[in-house]
Image (spheres, grey):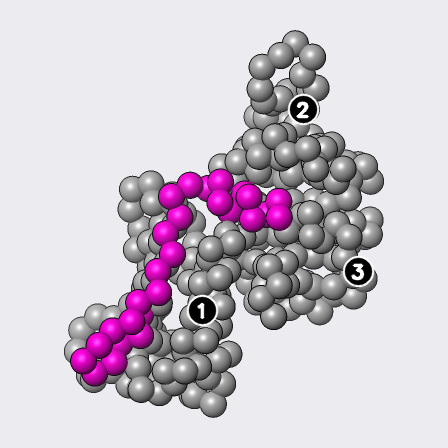
């Protein structure tokens, strides 16, 4: 049985991960955390019926809990997420990070870390990670003959834009065609002139309660190919995070992605 700690338990993703983990016989939830001062700290948030139910008390002390776990699962905000990574690394514990919106300095620190064991991905969905793989192949095959645009839509409460997933799609495409001098365009307005061949557009839409939609558009002359992923529930992200937690629990130190978890290399 894999012992896990879930951070950011007051958030939608933390709560979704907890719900699935409690139903999975491969996991034991040994702790959950929230930020200091959060109203849930100190409260029992155990889910499910039954008088014999084990209490789950929300803590604000990850360094104490991390000693009891095998894997930390983190979906929080960039600043606390980096601190959670450092705590897990220091304790020689694995961590799964699904937080988005990291500044480049944080990404560099994680990617260049030694003696760390982490799966980090802006999107933990299995289907979305298959989309990354498909988009990379399509971009490589279609090459310069097609104009590429990325459109994403999320709920109105999302704090960062474009989404980390949209930026990952962009990175995947650029990696597939490294010889191209890419010009990144985030929205267009006014007399912009003709679209340049090197442009890759990333457009962010916000509204309602949309969980997440991403489309990579390959527009040619006389035809258009679109690769789309739509998430209808946060459970698919939570499920992917738990797949990653099971995988990383027995792996050696390294900086891994969902591509590694799913064996897409």
Q: What element does badge 2 sit on?
A: loop
Quarter of the rendering occupied by the N terminus: top right
Q: What element does badge 3 sit on?
A: loop
Q: Which residue is mark 3?
A: 252
Front residue (pair 164, 30): 30
Front residue (pair 231, 101): 231
**Percent x, y of residue 182:** 41, 83
Q: On the picture, is 30 further left or further right than 203?
A: right
Of marks 3 and 1, which one's residue comes earlier in the chain? 1
Mark 2–mark 1 distance (CA, rounded to whole Å): 40 Å
Disc 2 to disc 3: CB gap under 8 Å: no
Q: Nearer the viewer, mark 3 or mark 1?
A: 1
Q: Which residue corresponds to the image point at 49% horizontal and 45% vertical from the top-left?
A: 236
Q: What element does badge 1 sit on?
A: helix
Mark 3–mark 1 distance (CA, rounded to whole Å): 28 Å
Q: Residues within 10 Å of mark 3 (few under 14, many from 20)?
A: few
Q: Which residue is mark 1?
A: 134
Q: Is residue 233 magenta?
A: yes
Q: Which residue is mark 2?
A: 56
Q: Which residue corresponds to the image point at 78% horizontal and 61% vertical from the top-left?
A: 253
Q: Which residue corresponds to the image point at 18% horizontal and 80% vertical from the top-left?
A: 222
């Amino acid at each position: 049985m894999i012992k896990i700690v879930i951070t950011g338990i007051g958030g939608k993703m933390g709560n979704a991960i907890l719900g699935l983990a409690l139903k999975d016989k491969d996991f034991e939830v040994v702790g959950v955390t929230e930020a200091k001062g959060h109203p849930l700290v100190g409260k029992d948030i155990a889910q499910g019926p039954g008088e014999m139910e084990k209490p789950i008390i929300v803590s604000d002390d990850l360094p104490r809990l991390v000693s009891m776990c095998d894997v930390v699962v983190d979906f929080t905000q960039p600043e606390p997420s980096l601190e959670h990574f450092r705590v897990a690394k220091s304790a020689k514990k694995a961590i799964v990070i699904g937080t988005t919106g990291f500044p480049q300095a944080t990404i560099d620190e994680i990617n260049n870390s030694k003696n760390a064991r982490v799966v980090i991905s802006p999107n933990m969905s299995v289907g979305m990670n298959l989309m990354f793989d498909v988009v990379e192949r399509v971009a490589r095959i279609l090459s310069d003959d097609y104009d590429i645009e990325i459109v994403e839509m999320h709920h109105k409460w999302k704090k960062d834009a474009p989404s980390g997933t949209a930026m990952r799609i962009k990175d995947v495409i650029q990696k597939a065609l490294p010889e191209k001098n890419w010009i990144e365009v985030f929205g267009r307005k006014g007399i912009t002139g003709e679209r340049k061949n090197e442009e890759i557009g990333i457009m962010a839409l916000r509204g309602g309660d949309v969980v997440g939609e991403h489309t990579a558009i390959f527009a040619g002359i006389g035809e258009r190919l679109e690769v789309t992923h739509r998430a209808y529930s946060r459970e698919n992200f939570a499920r992917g995070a738990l797949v990653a937690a099971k995988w990383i629990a027995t792996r050696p130190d390294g900086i891994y992605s969902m591509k590694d978890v799913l064996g897409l290399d």
